[in-house]
Image (cartoon, grey):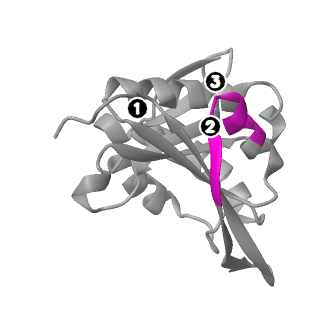
Amino acid sequence: MRTRLAQPGDAEAIAAIYNAAVETPLNFDLRARSIEEQTAWLRDRSGAYAAVVAIDDDGDEVIGFGSLSPYRTRPAYSTTVEDSVYVRADQRGRGVGRFLLDHLLDVASRHGFHSVIARIVGGNDASIALHRAAGFELVGVEREVGRKFRRWLDVVELQLLLTSGDPED
């Protein structure tokens, strides 16, 4: 398996993976993304806020994707990003998520980010375990901040500090 930057031609495969998650309580979207929406999302992912895909060993199928997004819009948050990792259902448990997360952390580090936040729906034990294995620490739980499938959903927030020391102004 290998990773590469996501390309416009990956929109359909990314949408299929993402939209499968929309059908579960593990994602806060309430409707599937169209190919046009997914293509627009990909256009917004470049440079430090990249989207990457994991490609199968044969080199032709997208089996997962991940991205970095701004954590908040106010300027003081500019050294913090939020990560997202999605793996095709038939590829889970094979190390694809860790492979993608490691790549995203490398991208974040190379772009000088200080902190990476993972906001994961409560009960998504696999994603929480993935992030903990990569060194993320629990920093809080946002209680009942979402509602889907007639249930209140918590968000578990984990954080990894990529750099230490005094910040430069």
In this orientation, which residue lies closer to the viewer: 62 or 114? 114
**Residue 126 occupies quadrant:** top right
Residue occupied by mark 1? 108
Q: Which residue lies furthest to the bottom in this view?
A: 150
Relative vertical location of residue 57 with respect to residue 160 in this rendering, above or below: above
Which of discs 2 and 1 lies nearer the camera? The answer is: 2
Chain-order first, disc 3 or disc 2: 3
Residue occupied by mark 2? 136
Which quarter of the image is occupied by the N terminus? top right
Q: Which residue is drawn at 26% across and 54% down?
A: 76
In this orientation, which residue lies closer to the viewer: 74 or 2? 74
- Whole-Å distance between the Cαs marked 3 and 2? 15 Å
The part of the chain drawn in magenta is 129-140
Q: Position of residue 125 (x, y in %)?
A: 82, 48
Q: Callout 2, which amino acid?
A: Phe
Chain-order first, disc 2 or disc 1: 1
Circle on res. 89: none
Relative vertical location of residue 164 with respect to residue 36 in this rendering, above or below: above
